[in-house]
Image (cartoon, rainbow, N blue to C red):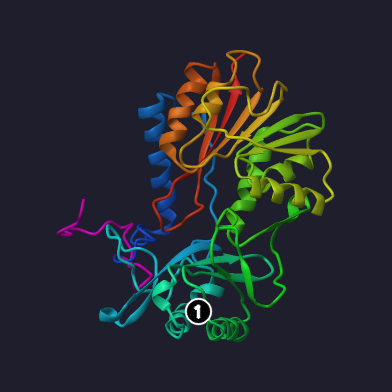
Amino acid sequence: GRMTVLHRESSMRVKPRCPHFGVCGGCSLQHLRSEAQLPAKQKILADNLARIGKVEPETWLAPLDGPHWGYRRKARLGVRRIPSKGGVIVGFRERRHSFLAQLNTCEVLHPAISRLLSDLRLCIAQLSRPDRIPQVEVAVGDNVATLVFRHVVPLTPADEEILAAFGQQHNIQVMRQPGRPDELVPVWPPQPLPLRYAMPEFKVELEFAPTDFVQVNTELNRKMVSRALELLDLQAGDTVLDLFCGLGNFTLPIARRAAQVLGVEAEETLIAKARENARHNAITNTEFRTADLHAEHGQNPWGEDHFDKWLLDPPRTGAIEVVKRLPESGGPRRIVYVSCNPATLARDSDVLVHAKGYRLRSAGVMDMFPQTSHVEAMVLFERGD
């Protein structure tokens, strides 16, 4: 739907903070007061659980909130060269269009990147083939920020000098990506630092590459991990299965409080990173395996082992093939499900409650992406027997 006439303003309506709002498709809720966004998202979650899953949580958890602006440490900026629009455009896609919105600033991007957007556009315009730079990957760690320039034709020595000068001027690491997603070539400095983020509550520090998947909101991620462990109610003797484990975001904090943790993930590069992070943190009670968690048939990716508790953190497609593999009795006592799509969460909840005998004990929303329509949630299932 599109608004054509505004007859009366809601008390929750505010003037959008970003001058690009309405054109840029990165945000969709800046006209709604920040304090009203979480209740709206909770209603979306509740509606999906009731309508699709035919379930309702016994209790609602307090929403998890964090910074509303300047929070985004990971992003992929599109690049186009369009002479009729003034040359190089750097930004996100426009709303309802495949065109790019020209951004001079971005209120949700980390300030270390937002302040560089105009200079970044000028930098790309100086390259020999700016029309062959399709995107720039943004990654900000606790220690350093990195930009990765994707290029589909070779860069000239002069191009690399321009990118290196940009990195030096703005004290930001610069890399180029000529081929595969994991093929990263340093431009400046010659020996870049690994990106890191810490979770002090669990004495864990994780390293990641600029192209690795990590949660975009540092503060909210810390709160999310803390709540997940609280809901798991970890005991010293517990064995835990962490499915869709990535590079160990939940696995390693869980390992600080449980006896043994198995992390399973489809991407081999992330599993390698998870093992490196376990060594980096001197954590020895973890094991990591690579497996397709969306496979419909065959042996369980986690083998025949029984685990006291599960944590699920699937992509938007959900974890339907995983939950179907659960036995109708004797499964894990608790399952914490972290979701980035309320529709697939509701679908999987239907199976867990009505086919597998679990109770939906609690549910709550998390504002991982303030100012956007993304609804992130965490729910707790407990075995009915």
**Quadrant the C terminus occupies:** top right
Comparing 284 with 226, the one in front is 284
Q: Is residue 200 above or below residue 55?
A: below
Percent position of residue 60, x then y: 51, 35
Q: Is residue 170 above or below residue 72?
A: below
Residues shaded magenta = 1-21
Q: Is residue 360 visible?
A: no
Type of amino acid under label 1? Leu
* Residue at screen point 57% across, 84% down: 157
Q: Tell me how many marks there are.
A: 1
Say which quarter of the image contains residue 23: bottom left
Percent position of residue 210, x then y: 60, 62
Percent position of residue 80, x then y: 36, 72
Q: Which residue is mark 1?
A: 116
Percent position of residue 66, x then y: 55, 57
Q: Is residue 6 magenta?
A: yes
Pointer 1 local density, CA inside 10 Å: few below 14, some 14–19, many at least 20: some
Q: Is residue 99 left or right of residue 327?
A: left
Q: Is residue 43 above or below residue 214?
A: above
Q: Provide the major secondary structure of the magenta segment.
A: loop
Q: Is residue 358 magenta?
A: no
Say which quarter of the image contains residue 260: top right
Q: Is residue 348 left or right of residue 141?
A: left
Comparing 76 with 35, the one in front is 76
Q: Is residue 184 above or below residue 273?
A: below
Say which quarter of the image contains residue 133: bottom left
Comparing 323 with 187, the one in front is 187
* Residue at screen point 63% across, 84% down: 168
Q: Is residue 167 visible?
A: yes
